[in-house]
Image (spheres, grey):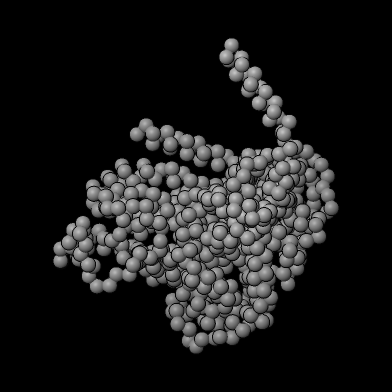
Amino acid sequence: MTTPHTQARPVSVASPAPRQGPRPWRPGRRQPVQGVRRRPSAGQVMVFLGLLVLAFCWVYPFIWLLSASLKSTSEIFGSGLSLLPESPLWENYARAWTEVGFATYFMNTVLITAGTVLLIVIRSSLAGYVLGRYSFAGKKLLIGIFLVTFFLPEGYTIIPVTQLTDQLGLLNTHLGVILGLGAGGQIASTLLYAGYFRGLPKELEECARLDGAGPIRTFGQVMFPLAWPITATVVILTFLFAWNAFLLPLVFTLSEPSLRTLAVGMTVFVGEYGTDWAGMTAAAVISLVPVIAVFVVLQRKFVDSIAGAVKQ
Amino acid sequence: MTTTDELRTAAAQDSRVRPQGLRHRIRKDWWIYLFLLPTLLGYGAYTVYPLLASWWFALLDWPGFAAQGTFIGIGNFERLMTDDLFWNAFKNSLVFLVVSVPLRVGLALLLALVLNRKKTPFKGFFRTLFFLPVVTTGAIVGVVFTLLLDASGPVSLALVKAGLLETPANFLADADTSLFAGIAVWVWKWLGITMIYWLAALQTIPQDVHEAAMLDGASGWREFRHITLPLLVPFLVIITLIDTVAALNVFDLMQTMTAGGPSFSSEVIEIFIFRTAFEATVPDLGYASAAAVLFGLLTVVLAVVQALGVRWARREMRTS
């Protein structure tokens, strides 16, 4: 029997409505038989236990990291499996933030992430708009190039990209990293915009045209604001990508330590301050908190964006 | 008669259309090209140019950051063919792919099936949990796991306590285990996103079809095997392709955990390229580019194989 409400439900993290107490009986659903329905089968218990064990493996590294960031280096290596620090050492955080320069790394990361997100939103919304709504000479060629380069690994392009940036005089600058991260690739964002604009009714922009708006004003004042759900998706995905980027920022700042991002700073920390593992774990927490905070606040949007992108 | 007439009118119409050909259309659509300009410039400089330039660079002898290299033909490729370290990295990348991708895709499917069932409790909580490592920075995950997998770290201690290990072991510092430890961490980090892919795929199947599919006894397994699984095959191919390419981009994790060591046992191709081009005392850009080109070819081959797989899967579905 097909029940209509179970079909084509969008992916969502939480169930549609919080249920409290016994569920009200509705016509069409078999009334739960007390006692029989409540007792799960042995298989179900096994599945649930397996899920719990797996979940423990997934959350443990985070708890361990948090606890290590409040221990001394010798305690990290000597305290065995204990997760509780003897006495929390908050100065680990102070040391990572000021002495090692994580304040600078943090600002670099914020700046580079913001720049990359801005560049990609502007770039892919403009291109996505015309790709989604108009036909023009060269469109097929452009889409062909997009498809060919869709899965290009980063390691393949890094040498020419570095050489190009060097020739432009942008090696060891923020702008160089932003362009490196945001100027090429990012086909998914463009396609997301294209798909969304394709689905909007034509009348909207025709009205704007009749009112005398040119294509640029039509886009800026009518079409782009309408695409905010996709803009939100693109911002989230690009934020993740840029905040966590590693290879390119590492290569671009090899000779300029003051430009390091958090991800790059971490590894250098390990190299230069090899013994200060306590400061390193504190630095790791500092680096992860913004991403995880953004994720926890926007988790449903995150998951929906990715699911939506895959379905497209 | 009529056919020639039709032809003539068609030709007339055609000639009426043709004068406003390419140049006219470009002039009329000038603003479209204006909108495309940022993408065309950025894409040309940062994607298309590097794609082509790698092939040129691969033919150069280009030490360090010298302004330019000198043309040496296929010398770099000849050197690569006999370079044991390159083939070692190539082999490691392949082992990484062959072990990690099925693990990631399969485990994620299992998880998605469990978390897609209406009866499973705390579904939202579990999904969030498994997704958490996906948003965290790969380089940081790598550094943290060097501590977790250390001989005095919790993993080793727990295994000793459970009697599975006789003496504490550092999995990343052992040439026999380093690559597989890397694979385990990579699967741990990325499982959540593949799980979301699978959940999205499962949503396209009507709920009642796979309602009782998992582990509800033999009938459930049969139902899964014969109904759910065939419907998932096209997704299987796409998800495997996405994860395969992701597996080729393991640089951040492997570089921070082992940097390819010990003694190159976990050096994948991306690390080989990075080491040759940027880290060596005398960086060798031409040689690294040649390795990158072969690496790109490997990706293309894999993509073609998977594309053929998609086609095969579609045909299978139609016949069954």
Q: Is residue A110 above or below residue B56?
A: below
Q: Is residue A124 above or below residue A32?
A: above
Task: Locate the N terminus of chain B by quadrant.
Answer: top right
Q: Residue furthest front?
A: A211
Q: Is residue A112 left or right of residue B236?
A: right
Is residue A14 visible from the viewing direction of this image? Answer: yes
Question: Residue A218: horizontal and vertical position, in percent?
Answer: 64, 56
Question: Residue A24: horizontal and vertical position, in percent?
Answer: 22, 67
Question: Residue B5: horizontal and vertical position, in percent?
Answer: 61, 16
Task: Locate the C terminus of chain B by quadrant.
Answer: top left
Taking depth in this image into account, of A1 and B149 the one nearest to the observer is A1
Quadrant of the image occupied by residue A119: bottom right
- Residue plotted at (74% across, 56% down): A162
Taking depth in this image into account, of A303 and B256 the one nearest to the observer is A303
- Residue plotted at (55% across, 50% down): A203
- Residue plotted at (45% across, 79% down): A83
Q: Is residue B5 left or right of residue B307?
A: right
Q: Residue furthest top?
A: B1
- Residue plotted at (50% across, 53% down): A309
Question: Residue A184: horizontal and vertical position, in percent?
Answer: 67, 53
Is residue B103 visible from the viewing direction of this image? Answer: no
Q: Is residue B77 above or below residue B262?
A: above
Taking depth in this image into account, of B290 and A43 the one nearest to the observer is A43
Q: Is residue A94 left or right of residue B117?
A: right
Taking depth in this image into account, of A19 and B231 the one nearest to the observer is A19
Quadrant of the image occupied by residue B163: bottom left
Total numbered labels placed on residues in the image = 0
Q: Is residue B37 left or right of residue B244?
A: right
